Image (cartoon, rainbow, N blue to C red):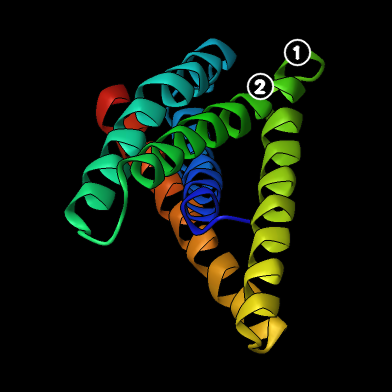
Amino acid sequence: MKKSLKKGLSFGLTSAVITTLGLMVGLNSSTGSKLAVISGILIIAIADAFSDSLGIHISEEANKENTRKQVWEATIATFLTKTIFALSFLIPFMFFNLFISTIISVVWGVILLSVLSYKISNEKERKNFSVVFEHLFIAVVVITVSYFLGKIVDGIIAA
């Protein structure tokens, strides 16, 4: 796979998982509203995908070694990957309640991040477990912090 596409795919997937899970868990813990969580996912899937794509685009343009084609490949790959995977978190919300949907989404995110991390570790010939653990640890920190931030906001607003 081309380096520019790989960069866009890995960045887009990681961002989709971490950002969407953090937002979902935070909104769930602060509002308890399925509508708020679904709205948040849709907004992340579009607004943050454009933001991340522009960030990758500018970053790749700053690298003088990249051709215009490589810059656009990374940009488009980031946008599509971020959008598609962020939207995939909506699926459980069509069939289950907020709590179950959130649990399913966290499991889905862990699976996605684990598979990506495993593939990266194989390519870099590093110890698979340590790479997967490192990436999942960061995801757990984001989810935990988001949960407690949501609770703090809920406590402040409810007071």
- Above or below — where is 36 with respect to 74? above
Q: CA distance from mark 1 to mark 2?
A: 7 Å
Is 151 left, or right, of 90 in this rendering?
left
Secondary element at image label 1: helix
Crowd band around label 1 with a 10 angstrom C-alpha radius: few (<14), some (14–19), many (20+): few
Front position in the image: 118 or 111: 118
Contact (CB < 8 A) between labels 1 and 2? yes
The numbered disc on residue 45 is none
In which quadrant of the rendered image does the C terminus lie?
top left
Is 105 left, or right, of 137 in this rendering?
right
- Above or below — where is 105 with respect to 67? above
Under mark 2, the amino acid is Leu
Residue 78: horizontal and vertical position, in percent? 46, 39
Residue 102: horizontal and vertical position, in percent? 66, 34
Q: Residue at x 47, y 42 (%)?
A: 22
In which quadrant of the rendered image does the N terminus lie?
bottom right
Q: Residue at x 69, y 37 (%)?
A: 105
- Residue at label 2? 90
Under mark 1, the amino acid is Met
- Residue at label 1? 94
Front position in the image: 50 or 93: 50
